Amino acid sequence: MAGPLSFLFRSSGRIYLLLAVAIFATANAVTHKLTELGELNLIDGRNPISFSNVLFIGNLCALIILVLIYAHRWHGMRLQQFHWQDWFTMALVEILDAVIVPILLFIALSIAPVNDVILISQIDIPLALALSIWIFSDSVNKWSITGAGFCLIGVFITVLIHPLADETIPIGMGITIGKGAFLTVIAAFVKVLSNLIDQTSTQEIPIEIVSIFKMFIGVIFFFGITIILYGPEHFIDVSSRFLWQWMLFYAAIIIVLGQFLWFNGLQQSTVSEVSLITSFSPILGILEAFLLLNEVPTIGQYLGGTLILGGIVLNQIGAQQRLKLVPCARRPSDKEMSKSGGFKGI
């Protein structure tokens, strides 16, 4: 097969990665669709697919499935070899990545267009670049800097040129920003921060432990936060068959199958291939928002999205240039396995 996309079919690893990215890209649209389905199937006037129910039950379903899948791989693992500092760092990272970020994104998706969330979340590219330069004194090239600049301008355009909405936040000079856009920016910052904290830890923990621990942290914290803030009565609809069937579907497809394909693809691919394939995520996300939600991009999203996609292309060129200078960096580590690929579902 000839053509620019022929590289995707030279090994099963690239196919796994592409399928995983396509699944992850549906997470935003599917989450938004689930809240709509909940509104159409109220229980005594309550949406069974509520913020707390989705985050708690979704993580619980994913935890159960992951334990069943990875249980046989735990034999022989010496958990005592990991120091308490390793567990503390992993817990801190997962609280940020598996609790704070999903909460912010779930609320954002419930009040903002999915395309806004997809495009604005790309602000993590300039954020990660700026923080890596500041904290790690990383050297960057003009391609990466230019690409980050394009992404930043594109995000600003997407934020500022938005349809009139009730839920907006004034930021001065008569300019307002949608509440969903604001929460998405905060989520992107927290995501980048969790990645940077994870990079500072030295112990490499197996991905099986990381995946299960992440879901375990999510279950514990979402349950505890809901009990503290709203009381146990907030889980009154937790036994809903409608809720469980959709959460099992979401956890099995978006979280577990997506991660299974992702991890297997990473083991058979190079860093440059992973970086290139994940760059398709925003395009796939916008396409799936149109197919699932019939959400047509606005003028602001078209303009901002064009600049963001251009910035992603330039950033990819910069990444390829950096890899040429470090030829030994061929395969992603376990940390990159768990952190790469963008939003992987709540």
Image (cartoon, rainbow, N blue to C red):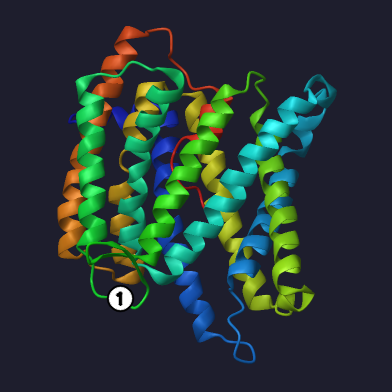
Q: Which residue is mark 1?
A: 165
Q: Is residue 102 visible?
A: yes
Query: Residue 113, located in which quarter of the rendered image?
Result: bottom left
Q: Which one is in front, 204 or 225?
A: 225
Left or right of 60 in this view: 126: left
Query: Residue 85, located in which quarter of the rendered image?
Result: top right
* Image location (x, y in percent) of residue 167: 37, 74
Residue type at mark 1?
Ala
* Image location (x, y in percent) of residue 131: 41, 30
- In the rendered view, tell whether residue 333 sits above or below residue 34: above
Quadrant in which the N terminus is drawn: top left
Quadrant in which the C terminus is drawn: bottom right
- Who's the residue at 54% across and 55% down the image? 102
Left or right of 32 in this view: 309: left
Point out the residue furthest to the bottom here: 44
- Who's the residue at 50% across and 62% down the image? 106
What is the tally of numbered marks visible in this picture? 1
Point out the residue furthest to the front here: 173
- Who's the residue at 25% across and 75% down the image? 164
Label 1: how many residues lie within 10 Å, few (<14), some (14-19) or many (20+)? Answer: few
Left or right of 267 in this view: 28: left
Q: Which one is in front, 231 or 106?
A: 231
* Image location (x, y in percent) of residue 74: 78, 31
Q: Is residue 346 visible?
A: no
Left or right of 80 in this view: 246: left
Query: Residue 290, located in which quarter of the rendered image?
Result: bottom left
Q: Which one is in front, 15 or 205?
A: 205
- Who's the residue at 31% across and 15% down the image? 322
* Image location (x, y in percent) of residue 279: 31, 38
- In the rendered view, tell whether residue 121 sits above or below residue 18: below
Q: Secondary structure at mark 1?
A: loop
